């Protein structure tokens, strides 16, 4: 009696969890990068500031891309879920 | 037939509480992802702020200030003074070879006051045992992340004058 949309939903959740884990790792690296850049800047090493900002920007763009991916997967899973829900009454006997 | 339909479809109470529990998981994950991305944006903005600070910061102008007469300090002696403002404690040391060096007295770890350990010829922070070189203020040991900012001295006759600060020494 498992609904038809469950496998798609589970795959979607797995994909979202994977994206979430990646974003978390990127965020931790970004936090370290910010503190390391600040520390180096205060120590007078101004040459590290620009690469730090560029890498942080790249990480942010990757995070944004992953968020858009999550939104797309979410929308697809919901659309699939809704279409299955709508299809269910017609499958039931009159 | 009516009973059969009732068995195949959701219970009646679900019509009143029409939120799918699996959908709740989706919403919470999506919202959490959004929160993480906004935090990532915050980190990026922080890095950009540092970049802007480094681009638009101006070199500070330090006043000249007479500290004392050179003959007032014996070999291995120290003199405390304030430079560039009255809030910035500094320490002037006459080293064993007769030269004068001056550093800010604030440890770069947690701002405890450093003192001159003559027997070991180094500056020591008593709070967490951070040691600094007397030659250039670099960190010899301990938790301080940066060298001590150095006060630039000029000797005018018998007078010692502070003319600037050198904050960015090599680590």
Image (cartoon, coloured by chain):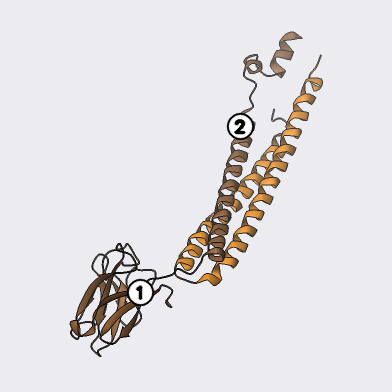
Chain colours: A orange, B brown
Say above or below: B4 vs B155. above
Q: Quadrant of residue A43?
A: bottom left
Say above or below: B27 vs B92. above
**Is residue A32 or residue A15 the one in the foreground?**
A32
Residues packed near mark 1 inside 10 Å, few (<14), some (14 to 19) or many (20 plus): some
The residue at which mark 2 appears reads as B24
Look at the image and tell me in which quarter the N terminus of chain B lies.
Answer: top right
- SS of the residue under disc 1: loop
Look at the image and tell me in which quarter the C terminus of chain B lies.
Answer: bottom left
- Furthest toward the front, the residue is B157
- Residue depicted at x 55% and y 72%: A47
The residue at which mark 1 appears reads as B64
Relative image position of residue A10 (x, y in whole percent): 67, 40
Badge 2 sits on which subunit?
B
Give the left or right position of residue B76, taking residue A42 as reference.
left
Q: Quadrant of residue A72?
A: top right
Say above or below: B16 vs B140. above
Q: Are marks 2 and 1 on the same chain?
A: yes
Q: Quadrant of residue A75?
A: top right
């Amino acid at each position: 009696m498992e609904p038809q949309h469950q496998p798609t939903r589970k795959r979607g959740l797995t994909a979202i969890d994977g994206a979430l884990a990646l974003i978390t790792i990127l965020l931790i690296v970004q936090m370290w990068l910010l503190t390391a850049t600040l520390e180096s800047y205060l120590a007078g090493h101004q040459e590290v500031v620009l690469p730090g900002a560029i890498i942080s920007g790249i990480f942010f763009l990757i995070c944004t891309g992953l968020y858009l991916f999550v939104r797309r997967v979410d929308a697809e899973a919901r659309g699939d879920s809704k279409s299955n829900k709508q299809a269910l009454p017609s499958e039931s006997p009159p | 037939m009516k009973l059969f339909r009732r068995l195949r479809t959701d219970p009646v109470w679900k019509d009143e509480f029409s939120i799918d529990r699996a959908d709740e998981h989706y919403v919470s994950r999506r919202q959490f992802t959004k929160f993480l991305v906004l935090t990532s944006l915050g980190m990026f903005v922080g890095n950009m702020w540092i970049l802007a600070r480094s681009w638009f910061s101006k070199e500070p102008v330090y006043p000249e200030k007479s500290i004392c007469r050179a003959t007032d300090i014996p070999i291995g002696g120290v003199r405390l003074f304030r430079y560039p403002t009255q809030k910035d404690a500094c320490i002037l040391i006459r080293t064993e070879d007769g030269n004068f060096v001056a550093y800010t007295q604030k440890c770069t770890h947690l701002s405890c006051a450093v003192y001159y350990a003559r027997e070991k010829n180094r500056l020591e922070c008593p709070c967490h045992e951070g040691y600094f070189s007397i030659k250039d203020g670099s960190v010899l040991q301990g938790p301080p992340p940066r060298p001590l900012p150095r006060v630039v001295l000029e000797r005018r006759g018998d007078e010692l004058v502070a003319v600037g600060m050198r904050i960015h020494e090599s680590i």
